[in-house]
Amino acid sequence: MDEVKTINTTPHLNRSKVKQTALEFAATQHFTFTNGKKPRFTRVSLNFLQRVEGRVKAMIADEVQRHPKIGKTLL
């Protein structure tokens, strides 16, 4: 039995919420193409999600590093 395991490349994200938020944000932006039409994004790439994942991990690492070395709770 050759089961293919899928590897979650973005374990710190709720992918559907990130996609939804990104598409909603893109829809509200006031930029246009050179022909005057507003872009209508309908998809979010895996590369986009991986970049967001990287930023989330970096932010977590930064917050932990800045935290005082005492106590039990990260504030």
Image: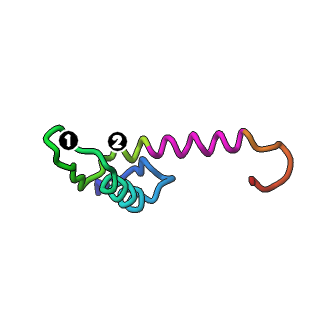
Residue at position x 24%, y 52% from top? 41
**Mark 2 or 1, nearer chain start:** 1
For mark 1, what is the residue?
Answer: 33
The spot of residue 57 in percent (x, y) is 55, 43
User: Height in image: 55 above or below 72?
Assistant: above
Please tell me how crowded label 2 is: few (under 14), some (14-19), or many (20+) other residues with Cα within 10 Å. few
In screen coordinates, is 28 left or right of 56? left
Q: Nearer the viewer, residue 12 or 20?
A: 20
- Magenta stretch holds residue 57: yes
In screen coordinates, is 21 left or right of 37? right
The spot of residue 19 in percent (x, y) is 36, 56
Specify the principal SS of the magenta part.
Answer: helix
Q: Amino acid at mark 1?
A: Phe
The spot of residue 20 in percent (x, y) is 36, 61
Q: Nearer the viewer, mark 2 or mark 1?
A: 1
Q: Amino acid at mark 2?
A: Asn
User: Height in image: 34 above or below 72?
Assistant: above
Quarter of the picture containing the C terminus is bottom right
Q: Nearer the viewer, residue 28 or 17?
A: 28
Residue at position x 57%, y 39% from top? 58
Residue interval drawn in magenta: 52-65
Say whether marks 2 and 1 touch (CB < 8 Å). no
Circle on res. 18: none
Residue at position x 29%, y 57% from top? 1
Marks 2 and 1 sit apart, C-alpha to C-alpha, by 23 Å
For mark 2, what is the residue?
Answer: 47
Q: Secondary structure at mark 1?
A: loop
